Image: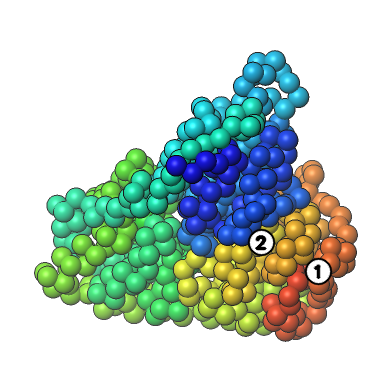
């Protein structure tokens, strides 16, 4: 058997999983792993400026590529710095392998400078957190980490490496191909439940399809579209999953839910059968209660995680399974029985709502005034966006407008943080560009979140990773200010801030900076920035008094 150091066993395990990049900062507890990168040409360690940036990059890389992202962080304060973005990956079902250096086992319980129980800390925000028990089991535990991260509903896994275990120890092992220790199965769902779902849909007069993240993960976009066409049913996408189906399809009306298109709520108020494909249907109980969803609607839910079925609203049929496999079963049953397509008036109404939304968005392209509207910013972006452009929304008020105002044609071209964490945008732009180097990548930031991780512009410059950050600067933490105005009688605390010129900051890092205070110049500026071979920042001063409302608009 080949003989290798402990560090080599880690890195060769990553290469065995076809990992191209790992993101992190080298520390005392990870020097053996770092050293193993030195002679390798098939994998690269991207050194970041803060561990939070590493986890954001790994998460975005996974979201766009469909393959696990990897971080490497050291003990003490190093690994805890990835807690926020790893929590976001956990909530978004993103596979990230977090490799963590840890204090020597003989020093545990002595409160040494960097001693921290990483496993205990991360247990609740990962699918699995484990410590390597012995050097000889490194390959086995690495296999297990990847197995867990990509199984069923995906998610992050933390692997802790006590530093004493990594010193001067060797591993004798044959690395195994992933195909022999990890099997991907597409659960087709209970056949009787598939037939029940097909029967409900066959009898529906006003069916509605909600496509969620499971559609993207299973590659079921074409199947969701096929079901919509067979039933003449309108299509909407669940919150933050706008790229699940082609938005140009004539049956697609818009994004549903919080910050989505108001027109889609008109559909759910009247639908008699709603099928949620690859979605938890989060918040549906409240939507039923407030009249946004027809209380008499029959709800079908297709979800890979059984505990999520019926969790947020009662369902008429709940099917545990892979979105693509279950959809294909339903399609087969409907074609065999002969689906009639529901009420033609329902299709016409959906088309009218689609047209109403498009007219609303087109009108926003003519907004003018003394201050630039964030809505007009997105209208200008739509002029230059290509189908392969990857758009990333950071958290914040200006970015909230984007959920209803960016069109997507291809899957895996949209990222937003499910936990509402500020500052994820810039490092996620780095990870997204590495995952899809041929695609333009644009990050929408507010000024509040920009400085959380602006230092990663240096990483992008150093590693020659060009992408665009468009920062809408309104001089405040917008979401919080809007809530204080609405719910606290305008008693403002901690929401107004000041900023440097972000375009100049980009130039100091070695990137390209633009300042656009004439909205008519924005589209061409974005087009030019996307052609640059260095990271670019476009700063746009926007109206500080314009805030989005929940439910679209």
| Relative height, residue 291 to residue 169 (above, below) | below
The label shown at residue 447 is none
| Relative height, residue 93 to residue 133 (above, below) | below
| Relative height, residue 158 to residue 373 (above, below) | above
Image position of 197 (left or right of 185): left
Residue 373 in sight in this render:
yes
Q: Position of residue 301 (x, y in %)?
A: 31, 53
Residue at 16%, 54% (x, y): give it: 191
Residue at 56%, 35% (x, y): give it: 170
| Residue underneath mark 2 | 430
Placement of the C terminus among the 4 image quadrants: bottom right
Image position of 268 (left or right of 542): left
Q: Position of residue 40 (x, y in %)?
A: 61, 55
Label 2 secondary element: helix
Image position of 8 (left or right of 77): left
Q: Measure the alpha-carbon separation of dots 1 and 2.
A: 13 Å
Q: Position of residue 283 (x, y in %)?
A: 44, 48
Q: Are marks 1 and 2 in contact (CB under 8 Å)?
A: no
In front of the other: 432 or 538: 432
Residue at 57%, 64% (x, y): give it: 435
Label 1 secondary element: loop
């Amino acid at each position: 058997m080949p003989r290798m150091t402990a560090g080599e066993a880690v890195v060769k395990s990553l290469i065995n999983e076809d990992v191209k990049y790992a993101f992190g900062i080298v520390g005392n507890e990870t020097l053996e792993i770092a050293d193993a990168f030195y002679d390798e040409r098939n994998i690269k360690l991207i050194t970041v400026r803060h561990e939070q940036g590493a986890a954001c990059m790994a998460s975005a890389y996974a979201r766009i590529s469909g393959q696990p992202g990897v971080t490497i962080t050291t003990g003490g304060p190093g690994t805890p710095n990835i807690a926020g973005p790893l929590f976001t990956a956990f909530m978004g079902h993103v596979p990230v392998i977090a490799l963590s250096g840890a204090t020597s086992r003989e020093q545990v319980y002595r409160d040494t400078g960097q001693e921290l129980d990483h496993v205990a800390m991360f247990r609740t925000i990962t699918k699995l957190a484990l410590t390597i028990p012995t050097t000889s089991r490194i390959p086995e535990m690495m296999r297990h980490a990847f197995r867990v991260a990509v199984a069923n509903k995906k998610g992050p896994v933390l692997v802790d490496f006590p530093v004493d275990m990594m010193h001067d120890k060797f591993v004798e092992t044959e690395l195994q191909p992933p195909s022999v220790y990890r099997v991907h199965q597409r659960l087709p769902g209970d056949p009787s439940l598939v037939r029940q779902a097909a029967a409900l849909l066959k009898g529906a007069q006003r069916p509605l399809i909600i496509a969620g993240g499971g559609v993207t993960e299973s590659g079921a976009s074409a199947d969701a579209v096929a079901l919509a066409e067979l039933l003449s049913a309108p299509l909407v996408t669940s919150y933050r999953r706008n790229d699940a189906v082609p938005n140009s399809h004539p049956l697609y009306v818009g994004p549903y839910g919080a910050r989505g298109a108001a027109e889609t709520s008109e559909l759910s108020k009247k639908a008699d059968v709603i099928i949620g494909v690859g979605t938890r249907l989060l918040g549906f109980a409240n939507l039923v209660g407030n009249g946004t969803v027809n209380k008499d609607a029959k709800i079908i839910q297709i979800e890979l995680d059984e505990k999520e079925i019926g969790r947020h609203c009662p369902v008429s049929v709940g099917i545990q399974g892979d979105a693509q496999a279950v959809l294909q079963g339903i399609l087969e049953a409907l074609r065999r029985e002969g689906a009639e397509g529901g009420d033609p008036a329902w299709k016409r109404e959906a088309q009218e709502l689609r047209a109403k939304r498009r007219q609303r968005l087109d009108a926003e392209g003519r907004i003018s005034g003394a201050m630039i509207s964030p809505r007009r910013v997105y209208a200008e972006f739509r002029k230059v966006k290509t189908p392969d452009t990857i758009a990333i929304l950071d958290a914040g008020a200006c970015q909230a407008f984007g959920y209803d105002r960016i069109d997507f044609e291809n899957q895996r071209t949209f990222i937003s943080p499910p936990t509402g964490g500020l500052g994820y945008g810039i490092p996620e732009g780095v990870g997204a560009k590495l995952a899809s180097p041929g695609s333009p990548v644009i990050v929408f930031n507010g000024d509040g979140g920009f400085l959380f991780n602006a230092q990663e512009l240096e990483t992008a410059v150093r590693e020659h990773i060009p992408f665009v950050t468009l920062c809408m600067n309104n001089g405040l933490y917008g979401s919080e200010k809007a809530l204080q105005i609405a719910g606290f009688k305008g008693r403002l605390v901690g929401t107004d801030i000041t900023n440097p010129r972000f375009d100049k900051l980009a130039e100091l890092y070695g990137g390209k900076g633009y300042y656009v205070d004439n909205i008519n110049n924005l589209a061409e500026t974005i087009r030019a920035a996307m052609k640059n071979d260095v990271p670019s920042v476009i700063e746009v001063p926007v109206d500080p008094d314009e805030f989005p409302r929940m439910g679209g608009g």
